[in-house]
Image: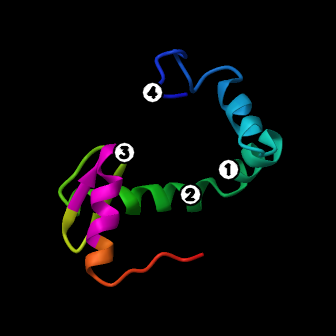
Amino acid sequence: MIWSGEVDNWHEGDHLAGAAKRAGLDPAALFARVDEEAERLHAVVEANQIAQREAGHYGVPMLAFNGEAFFGQDRYDQFRWRLEQQGLTRRG
């Protein structure tokens, strides 16, 4: 929804509630939990931003492993390949 180009101001109105419903979530429960845990969630976001900067990147989606940044959905295959090089095996 955010990057589709179909929705402007995705953070306003009922866009997020609709996205939550499409993901099988209860928007009212989700938003209530965000309000209840706002301080903790803010701290998690801040910690993740610091870790992202330390890994050398400033955008999303972004993954880092052993100091190597993998930015963008087009790098997921390369990230998985790197993990497999280090012995990761697929579950299931």
Depth check, mark 4 against mark 2: the one in front is 4
Q: Marks 3 and 4, Cα distance to the nearest angstrom?
A: 12 Å
Q: Nearer the viewer, mark 3 or mark 1?
A: 3
Q: Are marks 3 and 4 in contact (CB under 8 Å)?
A: no
The quadrant holding residue 12 is top right
Marks 2 and 1, how far apart at CA: 7 Å
Earlier sequence position, callout 4 versus callout 2: 4
Residue of label 2: 41
Mark 3 Cα within 10 Å, few/some/many (few <14, many 20+)?
few
The numbered disc on residue 73 is 3
Residue 7 image position (x, y, % from top left): 55, 17
- The residue sitting at 57% across, 62% down in the picture is 40
Q: Which of 83/18 is in front?
A: 83
Relative to residue 61, is residue 16 depicted above or below? above
Residue at point 51% right, 54% down?
Answer: 42
Element type at mark 2: helix
Q: Along the line of sight, which residue is nearer the eye, 7 or 50? A: 7
Mark 4 surroundings within 10 Å by alpha-carbon count, few (fewer than 14), some (14 through 19), many (20 or more): few
Rounded to the nearest whole Å, what is the CA distance between mark 4 and mark 2?
Answer: 23 Å
Instruction: Measure the alpha-carbon separation of dots 3 and 1.
Output: 26 Å
Q: Which mark is residue 34?
A: 1
Taking the image as shown, residue 16 lies to the left or right of residue 84, namely right
Pick the front one: 31 or 63: 63
Query: Which residue range is magenta in the image?
Result: 69-82
Tag 1: residue type? Val
Q: CA distance from mark 2 to mark 3?
A: 24 Å
Disc sitting over residue 3 in the figure: 4
